[in-house]
Image: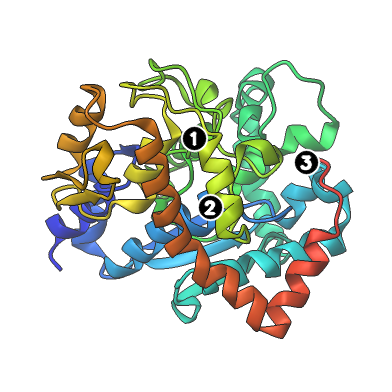
Amino acid sequence: MDVEEKISLLKSFAAEIVTEEELREVFETKEHPNAYDGFEPSGIAGIHFGLMRSKNIKKMLGAGVHFKLYLADYFAFINNKLGGDMEHIRTAGRYFVEVWKAAGVDTSKVEVIWNRDLMQDFSYWERFLKIGKITSLDRVRRAITIMGRKEGEALSSAQIFYPIMQATDVFQMDIDICQLGIDQRKANILAREAAQRYGWKVPVIVSHPLLLGLKGAPDDIKGKSEDVLIDYKMSKSDPSSSITVHDSFEQIKKKINGAYCPEKVSEGNPIFDYLDKIIIDDKDSTIRIERPEKFGGTFEAKNFDELVRSYRAGQIHPADMKAFVAEELEKRVRPIREHFEKNSAAKALYEEVKSYTITR
């Protein structure tokens, strides 16, 4: 795979790249650049984690990237996830690694790093202080949306550390490519600015998009800021708006049937969002949707764009789209669900995490 093919592979899922020219330079100079995705371990994995993010990681591994999975246990502690119980948080971290394994991520090619271990080195805190020294408190407060909290919300003193810690992680792990959600953009920009100020390696940002919750979003959501997008993303803290990797086919169908899906509207429509970000791998491939003969029989679109145009023209009913998406999600969720049903160690992890009280 040449450099342009690698860039094209990352662009196939990226919401934003800062900058493409720098990404090209990374691939031209490094055969296996370091990239990472990190998360606070908490709760039960939704399809935004188990399907979308694992799909992106498999693409990056295919591009020769050395991927680091960052389990941000102390970030979860600071953010009061799972009541701030560190034992529960670390169990949830092990569970999430198991989810990616069940989703087909080759975990032998992924380096798992715990925040607790990274923080043991004094150099971590030296970098932390250097970044904090050039970052105003107002700037930090504006960045707290990366924690899933709103600007202006009351914070503990520890939570003020959060954005600077996240920027510090980038340098402590020697990251070339920050591959996190677009909602984490502010922390990644802090890291870039610190690198430019101190002459450190400037990380490239390859932000993946957020997956819409079942309640949908306004049809003018495209192009909105990451702060606005956060309000409409799928979140495990809102079970009524999410599908988990453990849901049965009946549960998936019920949730999809109740999803926001107005006729002739594809923007802000979670059904089309799941097609775009999870289901349709090749946007130029033919898409067939089975319908009863009395409703027109099998519908065929030459590609994803034609499917969208056809829906906007009223040629496909929302009920047909929902049935198609439910079946396609089931195909992808089933292997993960069955892994946790058949593997005793994985099942025990799931049952343990399922018993925890979700606090954020």
Q: Residue at x 79, y 60 (%)?
A: 354
Q: Which residue is drawn at 19% across and 30% down?
A: 310
Q: Is residue 58 something one can see in this rendering? A: yes
What amino acid is at disc 1?
Answer: Leu
The image quarter containing residue 67 is bottom left
Q: Mark 1 points at which residue?
A: 212
> Counting other residues with Cα less than 10 Å from the Cα at mark 2, is it few (<14), some (14-19), or many (20 or more)?
many
> Counting other residues with Cα less than 10 Å from the Cα at mark 3, is it few (<14), some (14-19), or many (20 or more)?
many
Please state the horizontal and vertical placement of residue 7, each as a whole percent of the image: 21, 52
Please tell me which of labels 3 and 1 falls first in the chain. 3
> Counting other residues with Cα less than 10 Å from the Cα at mark 1, is it few (<14), some (14-19), or many (20 or more)?
many
Q: Mark 2 points at which residue?
A: 47
Give the SS element for disc 1. loop
**CA distance separating discs 2 and 1:** 11 Å
Q: Which residue is drawn at 15% across and 36% down?
A: 306
Q: Which residue is drawn at 53% across and 74% down?
A: 101
The image quarter containing residue 152 is top right
**CA distance separating discs 2 and 3:** 22 Å
Disc number placed over residue 79 in the picture, else none:
3
Please state the horizontal and vertical placement of residue 270, each as a whole percent of the image: 45, 34
Please tell me which of labels 2 and 3 falls first in the chain. 2
What amino acid is at disc 3?
Answer: Asn
Please state the horizontal and vertical placement of residue 210, each as a whole percent of the image: 47, 38
Please state which of residues 229 and 304 is positioned toward the viewer in this rendering. Answer: 304
